[in-house]
Amino acid sequence: MSQNNNSKNFDVLDQVNNKYFLELEHSVPHIQQTLFDLQNEFYKTWKNAVTANTSMYKEFMNTCGYNYTFPKSAKDILQNMSEEGLKFRSICNKLTISNIETLKNSAKTWNDNAESFVDLNRKIMHYWLEAFSPKRK
């Protein structure tokens, strides 16, 4: 009878766990897509702001009547800053991808060995139960 009650208690846990993970499997892809869409909108906003400001700057310089030319040294500085910024971003992207891959591999290793952990814990549990449970005659 005690065994049957314990089983019923764990049936509730199984139902709760199944419901929890089913909801996650449904909601996480939607959240990921929403975040991806948000990222794309911010990228477009950023690009449009930079493009619009550059366009306005060009228009201002062309219509104001000033005959201003960038010195070669200023152009070189801008090009060098741009190249260094792109190199920095490339390094950051590679580090980010490397860290994500490392975390993914760690999770995969844990998942691949989860059954071994359960077996080890089961053996430890049975050892302690045998050692400290009252002996039945």
Image: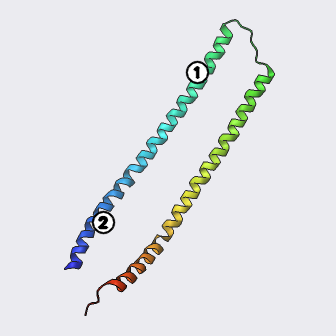
The residue located at (29%, 86%) in the rendering is 134
- Residue 119, given in percent of the width and then of the height, sits at 44, 77
Instruction: Measure the alpha-carbon separation of dots 1 and 2.
Output: 56 Å
Answer whether labels 1 and 2 touch (C-beta < 8 Å).
no
Q: Is residue 6 left or right of residue 99?
A: left
Q: Secondary structure at mark 1?
A: helix
- First in sequence, mark 1 or 2: give its number: 2
Residue type beneath disc 1: Ala
Q: For the N terminus, which image quadrant?
A: bottom left
Q: Residue furthest right?
A: 72
Figure check: 119 above or below 74? below
Determine which residue is flagged by label 1: 52
The image quadrant of residue 85 is: top right
Nearest to the observer: residue 101 or residue 126 = 126
Left or right relative to 24: residue 113: right
Q: Residue furthest left?
A: 1
What is the three-letter code of the residue carrying label 2?
Asp
- The residue located at (27%, 69%) in the rendering is 10
In the rendered view, tell whether residue 52 sits above or below residue 112.
above
Up-down relation of residue 101 to residue 122 (above or below): above
**Residue 101: image location, x then y, percent:** 58, 56
Nearer mark to the viewer, of 1 and 2? 2
Disc marking residue 14: 2
